[in-house]
Amino acid sequence: MSEAISPRVPLRVAPRALPRVPTGQDHEDLTKHGIKVTAADVNFFYSEHQALYGINLAVPKNCVTALIGPSGCGKSTFLRCLNRMNDMIDGTLLRGKILLDGEDIYQRGTDVVELRKRVGMVFQKSNPFPKTIYENVAYGPRVAGVKKSVILEEIVEKCLQQAALWDEVQSRLNDSALQLSGGQQQRLCIARALATDPEVLLMDEPASALDPKSTAAIEDLIFELKDTYTIVIVTHNMQQAARVSDQTAFFYEGHLIEVGRTTDMFTHPREKRTEDYITGRFG
Amino acid sequence: MSVSKYSEGRPYAKIASQAFALACGLCTLLSVSVLVLLLWNIFGFGWSSLSWDFVTSWPSRFAAKSGIWSALIGSLYLIGVTALFSVPIGVGAAIYLEEYAPPSRWRSLVQINIANLAGVPSIVYGILGLGLFVRMMHLNRGVLAGGLTLTLVVLPIIILSSQEALRAVPSTIRQASYALGATRWQTIWHQLLPISLPGILTGVILSLSRALGEAAPLVVIGAATFVRFTPKNLITDDYTALPVQIFNWTEQPQVAFHEIAAAGIIVLLTVLIAMNALAVILRQRFSKKVRW
């Protein structure tokens, strides 16, 4: 984790609050744990329609990478490429490479089921299973083959604690997950994603449907989680991107316009379009 | 009362709305009263012939001595065989079509054909059953041939209703499951089937109820009408079924036989209600696992 970035950088106030580090050093800083995911010249197609054009992006390990951009710019599509969730949509095609720890996840013979255990995902709309709270969290380990209830109980408690939900639900683990509030459901989905012990956590606008308090809880959580996981988050909320992320990538009409350290990007964007977007001039 | 600016343009809207509600109410009343009339008629006609003796006796040349035991047992056997074949095959086909088959011209073709088959008159399946099961496969005129023929009748309905039930499961559930590293089979078994089970069960029970009431295909493949034993061998032994027996009695000239036909209908209705009750119980038991 980098000390130079505080969890709650107010938008456009950063230059005075934080010492500016020269760009060359920045990169080193971000990648001090290495690179977890690399996209190399990724082109993505929904049947005839091309959604991504030649995306090159390195996701540093144990960092939060935010993908921002206006609706329909391809950021969610890109996120879903990282665990091959787009495979579920008929007629999609990816050209290029996505490397997870140096191995192409799109090469022939990749075990997609195994990949998704390593790359977890939290969706925009919380989608708990219509089962108990316990069963929701235990599902991932269960399908992975964990049978002993002692181990499962341990995992459930640990993950609910990581997701800052344990205190609220420990007395009613056998209640339906759908009785929880929206914010709790989303944290349950995060706990559920953590239960498979992933290496990378993908979050598709995880707080967009939540009230400010729940949003703050989720953001704090993301900040905690990056010590253990590599996180890629799609967000529409500029302040959120500025607060939680170390690296920001700006997508526009299927192209990756700019990528860089979040503090730099929000204070000195290199591209005019990035500046226009993050200052709210369009999008 | 003040009237909004644009309300003047629709002076009859309120009356039209009430008239429509009334018309819909009348439609409901009409269908319910037809049903009540039918039941009234049948119960009034057949109630006096109904007794435990009637249920447990063999058919006879004399209406007063006749019973429905062989037909009742024959029908239960038939439903058992039909369920045994139609439920796994029907649900399996639905799962394949919904969860595995990629969209293609072939799938659309199969889909359209299943929908069409659901509308084919059951007597046509009787002819198919006669040719396929009785003659080609030499299954004789036993319960097995009858059950397989009824399987053909209800299979399209089971497939369609199971597909409907699977399609009603929100896609977010599938995504969540796959994103957690579940295989297709695990997703189907742990998520989709438990959630869609009430819907599938409803379709199955409606289909089996239909199979229970079918007489035409059984007559075509040669179910007997006068059987004084219960089938021991599902292939070689003759059997009869409730609707076939009822049909046979209504053909007789004596009024006494018409009365026991009505009593037979009451027995048939009782079995149907029992099946539906079983479905309700099963649905509640299974849906305990799903906590919406």
Image (cartoon, helix red, strand yellow):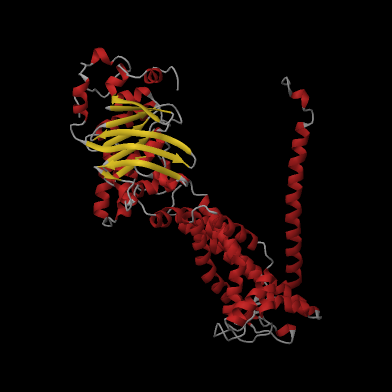
Which residue is at a point 76% across and 48% down the rendered structure image? B26
Question: In the rendered view, does B219 fall on the left or right side of B161?
Answer: right
Instruction: Tell me if residue B264 comes above or below residue B111 in the rendering.
Output: below
Instruction: Tell me if residue B141 comes above or below residue A118 in the rendering.
Output: below
Quadrant that contains the C terminus of chain A: top left
Q: Quadrant of residue A264?
A: top left
Horizontal and vertical percent position of residue A185: 39, 39
Instruction: Tell me if residue A261 comes above or below residue B265 in the rendering.
Output: above
Horizontal and vertical percent position of residue A231: 29, 35
Question: In the rendered view, does B185 fall on the left or right side of B6?
Answer: left
Quadrant that contains the N terminus of chain A: top left
Horizontal and vertical percent position of residue B204: 56, 62
Q: Nearer the viewer, residue B209 or B119?
A: B119
Asked whether residue A128 is in view, the answer is no
Which residue is at a point 57% across and 72% down the rendered structure image? B79
Q: Quadrant of residue A245?
A: top left
Q: Quadrant of residue A228?
A: top left
Which residue is at a point 51% across and 53% down the rendered structure image? B166
Q: Nearer the viewer, residue A208 or A2?
A: A2
Which residue is at a point 46% across and 59% down the rendered structure image? B285
Instruction: Tell me if residue A61 comes above or below residue A252 in the rendering.
Output: below
